[in-house]
Amino acid sequence: MKRPALKWPVWQFNFHHHSTSTMFVIFLATLLTVEKLASEKDTLSRSLDSGKQSSSKILSSPLFSAAESESVAAVQPNGAVEHIMLTKSQYEELKAGGTIKLGKNVRLRAKTAPASVSLFDTSKLSIFVISILLIVYGSFRALGDDEQASSLKDGETNADPSVSNTDVSTLDSYQAIFLPLGASLSLLIMFLFFDSLQLVFAVCTAVLATVAFAFLLLPMCKYTLRSCSTGTKISFGYCGRYTAAEIMSFCVSLCIVVVWILTGHWLLMDALGMGLCVAFIALVRLPSLKVSTLLLVGLLLYDVFWVFFSSYIFNANVMVKVATRQADNPVGAIAKKLHISGIAADAPKLSLPGKLVFPSVSDSSHFSMLGLGDIVMPGLLLCFVLRYDSYKRKQAEAENCVNPNPTFRQRITYFHCSLIGYFIGLTAATLSSEVFKAAQPALLYLVPSTLLPLFIMAYLKGDFTRMWSEPFSQVKAKTESKTLIV
């Protein structure tokens, strides 16, 4: 049978082939988890000297030291983090409160982070609210797409014909085990060959961000064009057939990505990161609790190893070093080769959208950050339990087994339980980063806080065995599963 052609918009990707699915998930998972510094470096700050056009980079903290040099993390005015090597004398001058010239218009100066930052700081509250909203929206988006595809399959007239679940990638046990290993290999490649492949990373990230943000904008575009579009697909030859809403969402997304490349602004980077989160949660499925556990535990070990133990093997914290490096701007590189001056030639280096960044309202020099992997990976689990809650409710309604007076334990769904656990884990990760003032793998707190309550509740409700292996299989009647004793 002829395999369908691969089409650029993310909602029309074909993921049936296991190798295609695995490679896409590994690449995007590496992008989402590589910025672990985001959840640990929330004391970063920024400033611009008034009345001057020069760029002022602010020293955050030393990362690595050698006999004759020091490596520091510096924050640019747009919030991007850059890895800079200094001599011992330069570093001592910075510690004494001095300012170092790095170029004609670039200076580096030290700024002490606040001694303590409130947990209720507006930047941290923004991180909490946005991360939870992204998980909830992505999970309900996936559930809605499944219901629309099921209605279309049953021939219902009110179903949206543009929605299809054939684009969904469902992970199996082998892929769940292989994904952390593949992500580790990808991270190591980025660590060893970043200078040679940075343009490739930047271009691939821009393409992924474009299609992911188009996926996020698609419902809004459908709503906007509902009165003037019939949903008829327009043919673009080998590129496929798309509706007016899909074309509009892709064009808007492309414009935003272009502006982000030219400016590197943190707000646009956040918008693209949100698109990546929603697309990943909505388009990747975990079929059972067994696969979910294998994936999350594997990513937890991946996170802990590369944050805590990689420095003992590679003499450097691989996760932190890759996270703090910036890729050359593709537009800037092309402009320099073609000797083009202006905005294109002055395009800044890009901090890849692997994190959400929010400045504090009370202190604009303070940023709180969270890696996208700390949203997406637990979000996949919450998407799974939401789909199971819906499936179990429909089964009960079909069999007329709905309890009119449910107990408090029966009212609490698995989705509610896991969402509360995610909030507790995110709070614990934030507190640990404040207490230890060091790199903390957020999945070390998020995975236990989401999985353990789910295990306990599934055991108490008697669903653990079913959720572990075949959660969406048809439930046999009790008369068929029990032996009648006379």
Image (cartoon, helix red, strand yellow):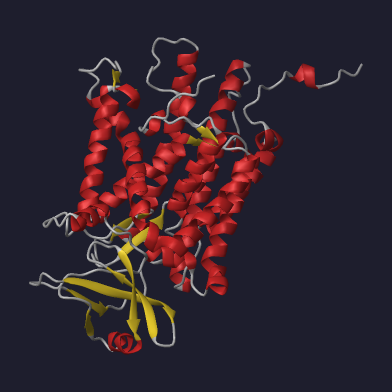
Residue drawn at (32%, 65%), measured in percent from left and top? 81
Which image quadrant is residue 401 in?
Answer: top right
The quarter of the picture where residue 162 lies is top left
Q: Residue furthest front?
A: 338
State which quarter of the image contains the N terminus. top right
- Up-down: is 405 above or below 112? above
Return the x and y of residue 97 as percentages of the image width and height. 25, 86
Q: In front here: 259 or 112?
A: 259
Tell me residue 106's x, y (percent): 19, 73
**Residue 77: percent from the left, percent from the top?**
22, 65
Please give the name of the residue rendered at 31% of the width and 63% of the height, measured from the top-left corner: 367
Residue displayed at 50% across by 54% down: 186
Closer-to-camera residue (336/56): 336
Visible residue check, residue 379: yes
Left or right: 324 in relation to 444: left
Q: Is residue 404 left or right of residue 154?
A: right
Q: Above or below — where is 472 with respect to 189?
A: above
* x and y, in percent, of residue 32 in the image: 44, 51
